[in-house]
Amino acid sequence: MLICIPDVLDRAQVAQIRAAILATTWEDGRLSAGTQSGGVKVNRQVPISSQVGAAAGDSIIDALGRSLLFLSAALPLRILPPMFNRYASNETFGAHVDNAIRRVPGSPVHLRTDLSGTLFLTDPEDYDGGELTIETSYGAQQVKLPAGHLVLYPATSLHLVTPVTRGERVSSFFWVQSMIRDAERRTILFDLDQSVQRLRAERGEDETSVKLAGVYHNLIRQWAET
Ligand code: NI
């Protein structure tokens, strides 16, 4: 499931994060890439050790925690501290799959990357190219969202960023280990949760919605890893 989540950050938050990270030091994006992806990656990133990056990442984690749609779609167990990248003209990231396991910086904890997230920090009209292109079972999907919007997709997907041909594309990216490892089960739970919420909004809390909410939580009991 590929899901776009609007307005994870508002305009003021986008402006604040952009100003902070653009003023800090950047490094070659290949420094954090694996062997395969390093060969096709041409961009820059805020170093993992950056205090500015860590503070900006924390504000994104807070925003994710307030997004009911994100929580429903990801059912997160752990979120890797968000990182930041930028693509200037002619920069690109060719087809690759993200590493399966990542260590949480500064800790012995490892995280399995079930979901990849890209949070756009540049509006689409400010650059050409730079589409995030994700292979799905229904063909390749191109994603280019307004600043502050998030796309969440299975980390198992082959994906790429097409070359930027005008302007600059700045984004945050991160990985989530979900309590629900299996993507199909996660999709079933998301559909059920969204339907229960719609039912509640339309009819109020009634016996059916209470029963279905129970089914949702009982499925999580069956399937969740915590
Ligand atoms: Ni990637």
Image: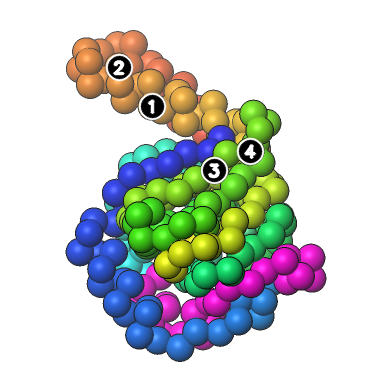
Which amino acid is tagged 1?
Gln
Mark 4 and mark 3 in contact? Answer it, CB < 8 Å.
yes
Whether residue 34 appears in this view of the structure is: no
**Residue bearing the label numbered 1:** 194
Q: Secondary structure at mark 1?
A: helix
- Left or right: 130, with 155 as reference point: left
Q: Nearer the viewer, mark 4 or mark 2?
A: 4
| Residue nearest the observer in this picture, 217 or 122 | 122
Which amino acid is tagged 3?
Gln
| Residue nearest the observer in this picture, 170 or 177 | 170
Mark with earlier residue (3, 2): 3
For image coordinates 52% across by 63% down, the residue present is 165
As for residue 201 lying within the magenta part, the answer is: no
Q: CA distance from mark 1 to mark 3?
A: 25 Å
Q: CA distance from mark 4 to mark 3?
A: 7 Å
Image quarter of residue 61: bottom left
Q: Secondary structure at mark 2?
A: helix
**Residue bearing the label numbered 2:** 199
**Residue bearing the label numbered 3:** 142
Residue 14 at what x, y percent from top left? Answer: 28, 64
